[in-house]
Amino acid sequence: MAAGTNQLVCLDDYEKKAEQLLPKFAFDYYAGGADDQQTLQDNKEAFTRFRLRPRLMRDVSNRDMSTTILGHHLPHPIAIGPSAFHKMAHPDGEIATVKGAAMTSTPMCVGGSTSNVTLEDLAEAVKESTTPLWIQFYIYRDRQINERLIKRAEKAGYEALFVTVDVPCLGKRRLDIRNQFNLPSNLGFANIAGELESQQLYTKGKGSGIENFINTQFDPSVTWEDIKWLRSITRLPIVLKGILTAEDAREAVKYGVNGILVSNHGGRQLDGVLATIDALSEVVEAVRGSNVEVYLDGGVRKGTDILKALALGAKAVFVARPVIWGLACDGQEGVKKVLDILKDEFGLAMALSGCTSIEDISRDILQRQSQYTARL
């Protein structure tokens, strides 16, 4: 255990400690949002607008947190969401993250094109684990990059494809622009090395390197028809990450996706959009009657946040930044501890609200507070 980590008892503690440990450019890259960061802040604050209505005297001595996600029976409804460049946080990078995930039976969605470790090496690192690995990617102008990533993921045993659909171009991330963010020259895109020119990420003095890279490599012409293309080249379940509206959720059902991850990219794309917990209900309602599963990311920091998300219809929650903070503080053990905290807090929240299983968690345990409170 790293020195001082026994004093870290909640996810906010890990964030504060990580800020002390990481170089400013790295912390700002992970923590920052777009423009005024309104959505970044609201993702967390929006959870406080939902208050809990506990039921009492219901024998909560035994609680079952297990659920099923994409056909996998899992001991809890928590998964690791995709994030980039883990070796900026810790020398072991995604290897430490995936090992910490396996230690807690937590599925991990790997950033397919932004990982500092290959898909194959990550799968090998947890080959004894039965917890699923999933791959996330963006659609490139050169579609052969995507096709090769999918084939490699299938061969390595990845079990679902998460497609991020909210990045036709990069949001204006002021912190990265001010820091002239560039990926350190000793790190790289392990899974697309040699596939394309990534010189933009290493060029100094030209604003944000990640912005230059994305705006030249990602395909802004993507449409719903591209889901058909993906279906034609893989049998993996397809989850769309970035849906926020009922209209797009209905389109997702129409095009036969398996899941929707309600996400605003951690407040890093279009500033001023709905907090994900506020967008969740309309997406859940839009897919009702279909087989499409709905998940949520953005702002999840406590066990009660998980409880609220599930009460509003999410099948599971995904966390990304808190995992990076755990990684920065103590490598794989830090990742494990962050996930253990969330699991323990969720179990406690279930007990204190009178829920003994996931099936007990319903909309009835919530009351939405008015956004405006009268001052007397």
Image (spheres, rainbow, N blue to C red):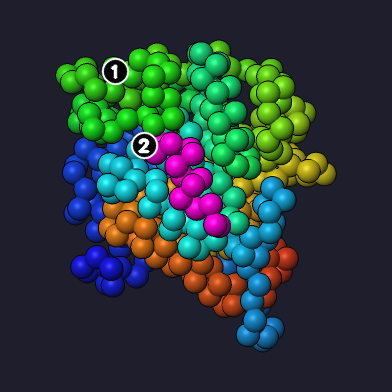
- Residue 351 higher or lower than 157, as above or below: below
Q: Secondary structure at mark 2?
A: loop
Looking at the image, residue 190 sits to the left or right of residue 259; the answer is left
- In the image, which residues are magenta? 115-129
Left or right position of 77 against 247: left
Q: Is residue 300 visible?
A: no
Identify which residue is drawn at 49% across, 70% down.
345
Circle 1 packing at 10 Å, graded few (<14), some (14-19), many (20+), is some
The residue closer to the viewer here, 310 or 101, is 101
Residue 252 image offset from top left, x and y in percent: 70, 31
- Nearest to the observer: residue 137 or residue 192: 192
Amino acid beneath label 2: Asn
Of labels 2 and 1, earlier in sequence is 2
Q: Which of label 2 and label 1 is nearer to you?
A: 2
Instruction: Report the residue at 68% width, 85% height from top.
Output: 59
**Residue linked to disc 2:** 116
Residue 308, how many percent across, how many down?
58, 60
Tags 2 and 1 touching, CB below 8 Å: no
Can you say whether 366 is above or below 348 in the image?
above
Q: Look at the image and tell me in which quarter the C terminus lies.
A: bottom left
Residue type (three-letter) at the residue carrying disc 1: Gln
**Element type where label 1 sits in the image:** helix
Quarter holding the N terminus is bottom left
Residue for badge 1: 200
Give the total of numbered labels: 2
